[in-house]
């Protein structure tokens, strides 16, 4: 009889023991935690680097953008405002603004013009937020809000914020107006009471980035220089013709013009007279499209013959927590050494705007996204003003620049 026996080799079918499995899980978990930490650290480093680069990029762009306008401030052909101040009574014979009534058409009386945007007699014109500087200069501090609001109180600034900007600016930020004639001008071919002719082919050069501008200025450099700023009643770009009402002194006011353009046409001989756009610009910090703080540039113009100034608002860069401005002026009317650095309220009290020949601007920028950055032990400073930011994990950097207002320097 044949018998079969089943033979098996001990240990030929053996699995993981519970201890081995627990060790494997522990090692895998340890490696996974390490990988997570590496990726988290890489992400945090990337966000920090990205936030820093974005704030630097925005800061450089904002400073460069503002510098171009600041350097042009006070450009009125051959009329130099510090020279007008030094020469005293000659001022009223060299700079005209028909926005003022006939009885107040002098350099010293243009503050009576209702719209601050038409105060072309003040090349820079600033407004100091009352919480960011003491009367003698910087030294105070204020708290920045992650989601800023808008101030509707004009007296939060000194001097009081004009109606054109009220309801646009966030608290804690200064405001600056800049007035000048555009860099690109065209020759005047003919001039008569109420009419100015220019080459129609040069219309695109004259209008710049505007469809139909209405604020213009004429200037000529003979006899020491003279300039007049006015609103066009009609503009015919096809024929190169601008009409201005009232055409003669004593005529009824029209649009923004309260008086006639010139007192004597011989002051503006054709071929020696240039026609420019009159630029009225303001910079301030407002609430951007994304709900955060942003630097804005607002340009004022009007429709031909219109009765009001019309703003065109552009958001320059986002993430600007505050704008701080200081103004430098000479110690005397004929001085070209800018020794006095003051805030806007101090300059305004001294009525020294025509003597301002230099500006310092400071910006505090934040990264667009949170970068998980620890709160700084020391709050950042912008032109001597301490800024206390919220603990929102954003990268913040201050940027400052000193800019000469070339057309405001005496003797240029």
Image (spheres, rainbow, N blue to C red):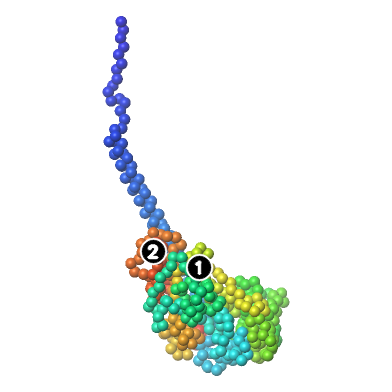
Relative horizontal placement of residue 391, taking residue 84 as reference (left or right): left
Residue at the outermost bottom position? 89
Where's residue 123, x and y in %?
53, 82
Relative horizontal placement of residue 221, taking residue 291 as reference (left or right): right
Say whether residue 15 is visible. Answer: yes
Where's residue 304, x and y in %?
67, 77
Q: How many numbered discs?
A: 2
Relative horizontal placement of residue 304, taking residue 37 as reference (left or right): right
Q: Earlier in the sequence, mark 1 or mark 2?
A: 1
Q: For the residue labelled by badge 2, is the local secondary structure a helix, a strand or a loop?
A: loop
**Depth check: 225 or 92 in front?**
92
Say whether residue 295 is visible. Answer: no
On-image quarter of the N terminus = top left
Q: For the residue labelled by badge 1, is the local secondary structure a helix, a strand or a loop?
A: strand
Q: Is residue 316 above or below residue 347?
A: above
Q: Residue at x 38, y 61 (%)?
A: 373
Numbered badge on residue 391: 2
Q: Residue at x 40, y 67 (%)?
A: 389
Where's residue 78, x and y in %?
57, 86
Q: Is residue 59 above or below residue 199?
A: above
Would you name the residue on which mark 1 appears? Answer: 287
| Residues at circles 1 and 2 in contact by the CB criterion of under 8 Å | no
Q: Is residue 357 above or below residue 237?
A: below
Residue at the outermost top position? 1
Distance (Cα) linking label 1 and label 2? 20 Å
Where's residue 154, x and y in %?
50, 78
Instruction: Answer few, some or many: residues within 10 Å of disc 1's Cα (few below 14, many 20 plus, some between 14 and 19).
Output: many
Q: Residue at x 45, y 71 (%)?
A: 322
Numbered badge on residue 57: none
Instruction: Answer few, some or many: residues within 10 Å of disc 2's Cα (few below 14, many 20 plus, some between 14 and 19).
Output: few
Q: Residue at x 34, y 47 (%)?
A: 33
Q: Is residue 47 above or below residue 228?
A: above
């Amino acid at each position: 009889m044949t018998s079969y026996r089943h033979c098996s080799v001990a240990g030929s079918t053996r699995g993981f023991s519970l201890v081995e499995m627990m060790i494997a899980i522990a090692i895998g978990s340890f490696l996974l935690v390490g990988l997570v930490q590496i990726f988290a650290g890489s992400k945090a480093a990337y966000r920090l680097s990205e936030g820093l680069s974005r704030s630097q990029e925005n800061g450089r762009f904002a400073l460069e953008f503002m510098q171009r306008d600041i350097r042009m401030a006070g450009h009125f052909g051959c009329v130099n405002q510090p020279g007008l101040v030094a020469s005293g009574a000659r001022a009223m014979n060299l700079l005209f603004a028909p926005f003022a009534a006939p009885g107040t058409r002098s350099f010293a009386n243009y503050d009576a013009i209702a719209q601050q945007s038409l105060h072309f007699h003040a090349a820079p014109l600033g407004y100091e937020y009352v919480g960011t500087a003491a009367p003698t200069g910087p030294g105070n501090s204020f708290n920045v809000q992650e989601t800023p609001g808008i101030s509707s109180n004009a007296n939060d600034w000194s001097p009081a914020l004009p109606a054109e900007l009220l309801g646009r600016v966030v608290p804690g930020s200064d405001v600056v107006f800049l007035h000048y004639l555009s860099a690109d001008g065209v020759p005047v071919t003919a001039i008569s009471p109420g009419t100015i002719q220019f080459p129609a082919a040069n219309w695109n050069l004259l209008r710049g980035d505007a469809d139909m501008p209405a604020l213009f200025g004429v200037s000529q450099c003979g006899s020491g220089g003279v300039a007049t700023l006015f609103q066009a009643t009609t503009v015919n770009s096809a024929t190169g013709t601008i009409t201005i009402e009232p055409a003669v002194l004593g005529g009824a006011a029209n649009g923004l013009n309260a008086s006639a353009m010139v007192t004597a046409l011989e002051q503006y001989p054709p071929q020696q007279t240039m026609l420019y756009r009159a630029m009225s610009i303001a910079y301030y910090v407002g609430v951007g499209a994304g709900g955060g703080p942003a630097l804005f540039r607002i340009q004022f113009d009007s429709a031909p013959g219109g009765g009001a100034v019309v703003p065109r608002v552009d958001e320059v860069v986002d993430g600007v927590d505050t704008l701080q401005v200081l103004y430098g002026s000479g110690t005397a009317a004929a001085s070209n050494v800018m020794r006095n650095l003051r805030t806007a309220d101090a300059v305004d009290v001294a009525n020294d705007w025509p003597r301002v020949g230099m500006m310092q601007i400071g910006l505090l920028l934040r990264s667009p996204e949170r970068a998980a950055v620890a709160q700084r032990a020391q709050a950042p400073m912008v032109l001597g003003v301490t800024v206390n930011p919220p603990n929102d994990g954003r990268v913040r950097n201050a940027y400052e620049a000193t800019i000469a207002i070339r057309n405001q320097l005496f003797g240029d």
